[in-house]
Image (tube, helix red, strand yellow):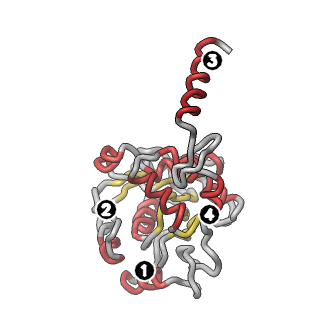
């Protein structure tokens, strides 16, 4: 070990003594990382039976939200299936909030790893899961303001663990700056995506491929539907959606 490496490790060790690593969600001390095993273990999987379309907990085959979408639009969702790693609540809700709104980007790696585990071990989707991983793009103006796209940060470890390529940042883009979705009604959310909001800038990246689309939270499916419609128009064979968590229907 050279002197530079030794000093760097010594510095990190001293910092850990003064500021020991802790779980960003519950505050418990950690040996390493930013999210503790207890918090991850508390993430509540969506219990069967669940909606065959969006994957949320539901008594029948189709949840009220998906039925309402079909009634109002006269068409099925453009994505082939959607699934969620957990129910949106408790520790995972807090973790997502910290990632999106409190600049805790370091949570993306353990959250993405959790989602990949649900895909591979939990069998959320039948294998092969995908040939390429995409993520919901953020408009450049909003991404500059936030400093990052949390969907991309989550998608990176998912793609790595699945062993498939991550769609390049310039291949699938958001072309229209839509209003924030938080607090919007279901109808308003769908209205946000009327017209061309997304675009496939590189069709060779998705043409004929099974695409896994990653996002943080599934609510009405408006975002997933608009993205899937665009990806399929760009040549994708199938588009399946997976989110960290799904809000109740």
Image quarter where the N terminus lies is top right
Side of 88 relative to 124 (left or right): left
Q: Nearer the viewer, mark 3 or mark 2?
A: 3
Q: Measure the alpha-carbon separation of dots 3 and 4.
A: 38 Å
Q: Earlier in the sequence, mark 1 or mark 2?
A: 1
| Observer-nearest of 211 and 11 | 11
Which residue occupies 57% across, 38% down?
20
Residue topped by disc 2: 180
Q: Measure the alpha-carbon separation of dots 1 and 4.
A: 37 Å
Residue 211 placement: quadrant: bottom right
Residue topped by disc 3: 6
Q: Give the secondary structure at mark 3.
A: helix
Q: Pointer 1: residues within 10 angstroms few (<14), some, or many (20+)?
A: few
Q: Earlier in the sequence, mark 2 or mark 4?
A: 4
Which residue occupies 55% across, 75% down?
56
Q: Earlier in the sequence, mark 3 or mark 2?
A: 3
Q: Pointer 2: residues within 10 angstroms few (<14), some, or many (20+)?
A: few
Residue 42 marker: 4
Tell me if label 1 and label 3 are in contact, CB under 8 Å.
no
Which residue occupies 64% across, 66% down?
124
Side of 189 relative to 40 (left or right): left
Q: Nearer the viewer, mark 1 or mark 3?
A: 3
Q: Measure the alpha-carbon separation of dots 2 and 4.
A: 29 Å
Tell me if label 2 and label 4 are in contact, CB under 8 Å.
no
Q: Give the secondary structure at mark 1.
A: loop
Q: Measure the alpha-carbon separation of dots 3 and 2.
A: 47 Å
Residue 75 marker: 1
Q: Earlier in the sequence, mark 1 or mark 4?
A: 4
Q: Pointer 3: residues within 10 angstroms few (<14), some, or many (20+)?
A: few
Tell me if label 3 and label 2 are in contact, CB under 8 Å.
no
| Observer-nearest of 212 and 58 | 58
């Amino acid at each position: 070990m050279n002197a530079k490496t030794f000093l760097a490790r010594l510095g990190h060790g001293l910092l850990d003594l003064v500021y020991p690593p802790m779980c960003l969600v519950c505050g418990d001390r950690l040996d390493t990382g930013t999210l503790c095993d207890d918090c991850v273990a508390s993430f509540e999987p969506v219990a069967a039976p669940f909606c065959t379309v969006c994957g949320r907990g539901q008594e029948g085959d189709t949840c009220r939200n998906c039925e309402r979408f079909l009634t109002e639009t006269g068409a099925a969702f453009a994505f082939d299936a959607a699934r969620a790693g957990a129910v949106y609540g408790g520790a995972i809700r807090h973790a997502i909030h910290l990632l999106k709104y409190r600049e805790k980007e370091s949570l993306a790696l353990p959250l993405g790893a959790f989602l990949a585990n649900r895909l591979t071990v939990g069998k959320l989707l039948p294998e092969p899961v995908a040939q390429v991983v995409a993520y919901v793009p953020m408009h450049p103006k909003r991404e500059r303001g936030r400093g990052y796209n949390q969907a991309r940060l989550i998608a990176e470890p998912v793609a790595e663990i699945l062993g498939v390529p991550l769609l390049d940042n310039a291949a699938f883009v958001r072309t229209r700056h839509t209003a924030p979705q938080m607090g919007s009604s279901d109808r308003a959310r769908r209205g946000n995506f009327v017209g061309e909001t997304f675009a496939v800038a590189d069709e060779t990246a998705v043409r004929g491929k099974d695409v896994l689309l990653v996002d943080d939270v599934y609510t009405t499916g408006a975002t997933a539907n608009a993205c899937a419609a665009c990806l399929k128009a760009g040549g994708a064979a199938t588009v399946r959606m997976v989110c960290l968590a799904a809000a109740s229907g």
